[in-house]
Amino acid sequence: MKKHILLVEDNERLRSNLLFVLNKEGFDAVGAINGTEALELIAKAPPDLVVSDIMMPDMDGYDLVKHLRETPETLSLPVIFLTAKTAPEEQRSGMLFGADDYLTKPVNINDLLATIHVRLERAEKQKKKWIANLNHLQTHLASILPHELRTPVSGIMGASSFLRNSLDSLAREDIEELHNCIEDSATRLARIAENFLLYVQLQLLLEDQANEEEPNIVREQSRMSNVREYIEDIATSVANKHNRMPLLRLTLEDATIHCSAAHFHKALTEVLENAFQFSPKDTPIEIVSKNTGSTLLISITDYGRGISQEQIETLKEYPTVFKQFDRRKFEQQGVGMGLVLVYNILKLYDGTMTIKSELGHTTTVCLEFHLAIS
């Protein structure tokens, strides 16, 4: 089946010449004179790839790509920019807006064809990868998610039904207990939903920067200062939640790093929740942050059951499909997504997550973030 290509170019002669060549090369190519017309054509027949000029009347290439990246149906649609501007900052602007590649005018037709083939091949590989991931995800969810959803839903329905039928005879402490049951169950449901949404968002961001030749825009535009205070606040909150504040050990150095505050909070919280949940209540949790001059190393150590080297190796596979370790042996909540989210967050900012563990004794998770140097 022919690949459908949309060429957006306001120069009629150039548009006609390029369409002739593209169709001769075996593509199903159509043209538009600006971004507005392009969007109308895309709505009728979504293309496999867009080749677009930047400077055009009514809606230029930047606005066209912005609209495509904000629309779920065209979020991953490959876009190649054509422009007479050759300055490096212009090329960077194109990438920031979401273009996949950038060719300067006058266009060398062989370069254009080669770029189109590369982008179509990459899009096809990404599509196959997503299908494989979705199949794996479907199998995992079929075995885990029904239980994880049923338990909190049953708690909410049971407690609310009891309240409705017995409200007149319940003491205040009974009502508070039922209320807490409903609130805890709702919180658990919300966390499952939020984790899945974050997982999808991270996958989309990682796909956008999959080309190693392009700059890591997310990393460059995100920075956090006073990281020590963030660590103290997050660690204190999680320790208090588990009633283990006296056993929290902090040895922290400060830094400014490349990461959004929301992603940093999620990554550290997930690691700490695991540390507290899977270690005895009378053992300490140690957090150490060290500024190396180029990175900030944050290590979280617990003295719990540990995980095997084989289990650690599964976390190095990318894209990682979430999994709970020893679910049958240890009763636990969740869908096993926590460390996968941490892994993907670190990857997004070119950082690393490493795990060292001795079964039955200790586990140390180390998060490495790049420093943001002015």
Image (cartoon, rainbow, N blue to C red):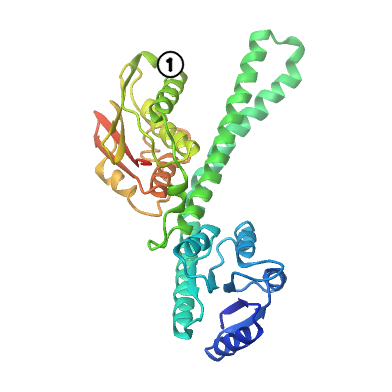
Residue beneath disc 1 = 243
Q: Where is residue 126 in the image (x, y as percent from the top left)?
A: 47, 65
- Judge by depth and name the residue closer to the eye, 285 or 77: 77
> Does residue 360 lie above or below 342 as drawn?
above
Residue 151 visible at all? no
> Does residue 343 lie above or below 26 as drawn?
above
Q: In which quarter of the image is residue 36?
A: bottom right
Quarter of the picture containing the C terminus is top left
Quarter of the picture containing the N terminus is bottom right
Element type where label 1 sits in the image: loop
* Residue type at numbered disc 1: Asn
- Judge by depth and name the residue closer to the eye, 125 or 326: 125
Q: Residue at (39%, 33%) from the top-left corner?
A: 271
Numbered disc total: 1
> Does residue 322 lie above or below 362 as drawn?
below
- Neighbourhood count class around disc 1 (C-alpha, 10 Å): few under 14, some 14–19, many 20 upward: few
Q: Where is residue 301 in the image (x, y as percent from the top left)?
A: 29, 29
Q: In which quarter of the image is residue 33?
A: bottom right
Q: Quadrant of residue 245?
A: top left
Left or right of 355? Residue 64 is: right
Residue 96 visible at all? yes
Q: Where is residue 78 in the image (x, y as percent from the top left)?
A: 53, 68
Q: Residue at (53%, 50%) from the top-left corner?
A: 200
- Judge by depth and name the residue closer to the eye, 167 or 354: 354
Q: Residue at (38%, 63%) from the top-left corner?
A: 213
> Does residue 16 lie above or below 58 as drawn?
below
Q: Position of residue 5 (x, y in %)?
A: 59, 78
- Judge by depth and name the residue closer to the eye, 320 or 230: 230
Left or right of 227? Residue 139 is: right
Left or right of 265? Residue 253 is: left
